[in-house]
Amino acid sequence: MDEKILTIDISSKSVKIGLVNASTLETEAWNNNDHVIIDEDMDGFAKHFDMNDLWNKILDGIKEVLKNFDPDSQRIIGLSTCAQRIAVVFLDSKGEVIYGGPNKDVRGLDSAYMIDDEFSDEEMFELTGHSPNLVFCLARLLWYQEEEEDQFEKIHTVFTLDDWLVYKLTGVICSDASSAAETQLLDIKNCTWSIKLIEAFDLNPEWFPEFIEPGSIVGNLLPKIAKNFGLKQMEIPVVKTGGDTQATLLGMGAIDNGDIGISVGTSTPLHLVSDKPIIDPECNFWATLHGIKDKWLVEANTGNAGLGYNWFKEAFFPNKTDVDSVIESYLQDIEPGADSTYAFLGPSIMDFKDQTSVKKGVFVFQTPGMILEELPTIKNFAKAVLENIAFGIYENYQALLNFAKSDVRTFCAGGMSKSKEFCQMLANVLNAEISVPQYKDSAFTGAAMNVLIALKKHPDHRSIISDVFKFDRYSVNPEIADKYKSIYLDWKHIKSQVDDL
């Protein structure tokens, strides 16, 4: 029978469901539906998911991708999940949701002082590899402890969003260390819940689930859920994957020491794979865990790369269809530097110490005049926006190279990696060859890889990459790379002035 793998990815914006071919790892059917995030205050600091809406969209999405599924000729061999990092869910003793908060919820701003009173920034970073204190699960727990005491007393289980999703599908309470690493409650060096933090803030250690290894079978899909989809199979194993970023790294092939994976999406995190935890002495670049045993990550992040790009498309191409193809042609037409047109829409070097200043979105270009014959057009602005993203990636890439202890291989995936012109631009800006997997839905691919390993159809991720993956390789054009060195310096100089506006 034709073997398929169901995959679920709750991203920053939407619920994504995929049906992946178990032999080729191609996503053959998929569904994407925006989830609902509710603002609790006028300023938009405190946010929560509509958890009923979230669950219903998961169920509806699975139904949609299975609408052409033929149980007589096809078989689902497993299901795996991943979800946005930093998002957490608190349950009561009956398994009902008290709170489900997305990665954008910064209610912890009001309670971070409690962490500051107990630990210095350096102590917290050395212990957890993460900052700032206000965005993670620990600060949210303290907010409930201080602001919603009745609800705080009802807390029975603390989940990451992927933990909750696995629980809803199987009824099993568990977590994994790579997910927990994004809570600021994990001892990053020992890969255990930090008893030091739990005791310091009078939290109940029984709230925090036991760990299983990513890529392990948690249990079977609950029969009532399988029946809801009209599936005849009695047992469908559910495999733990964890954070969507870790899944994406697996799905792009960034698994070995010295690999750098670039996930070009709503934000653009970059990760250096390491065989030991590396703590940034400047307390800026995060230390976290890969979804592979005994592999750590150093994380840098450009900020809102894809978010700014999507804004540009919606604002400047409101009535056009297939905008990505239009912009792809623009990138071919315009030379590097976009005729001295520069964009500053957010992507830059990671700096979580600067959380309060409001950045200005700016285009810099030559104004119309009597002397100039060539004036900037929408093509120039499009090129400048993509170069802005590439320059932001470059700054963070250079920072990660400082932590690398071996030769580096560079991988890229995510929505914007579908643009061949952007990938070639990025290779020239980074002055490094880039490997881009054939199938760009890398979170689905990474989750599906874990199913194949859990079911012992492959021994490890490396064998899957060797046997199944196909890559597009983008080599450096030395002449264009040299041009971009100069263009970047001009962009950086102007940016220093833009930042002072």
Image (cartoon, grey):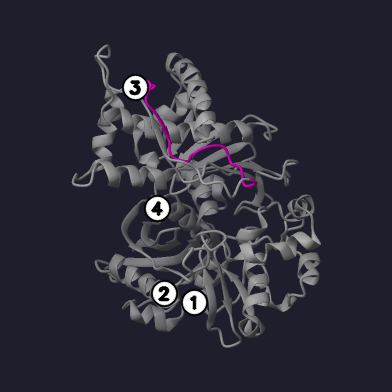
Task: Identify which amino acid the numbered label 1 is placed on.
Answer: Lys
**Outermost residue toward the bottom?**
94
Q: Which residue is mark 4?
A: 23
**Element class at badge 4:** loop
Q: Which residue is mark 1?
A: 168
Tell me which corner region of the image, top left, top right, bottom left or bottom right, holds residue 22: bottom left
Q: CA distance from mark 1 to mark 3?
A: 56 Å
Name the mark on residue 55.
Answer: 2
N-term-proximal mark, 2 vs 3: 2
Against 409, residue 123 (above or below) is: below
- Report the mark closest to the observer, 1 or 4: 1
Q: Is residue 462 left or right of residue 384?
A: right
Please state if 273 lies on the left or on the right of 450 as rendered.
right
Q: Position of residue 35 (x, y in %)?
A: 38, 66
The range drawn in magenta is 336-353
Q: Residue sitting at 44 percent across and 62 percent down?
A: 10
Q: Foreground: 386 or 29?
A: 386
To which residue does mark 3 refer?
Answer: 366
Mark 1 vs mark 4: which is more N-terminal? 4
Residue drawn at (46%, 67%) of the image: 42
Disc 2 or disc 1, which is closer to the eye? Answer: 2
Front residue of this view, candidates 436 and 88: 88
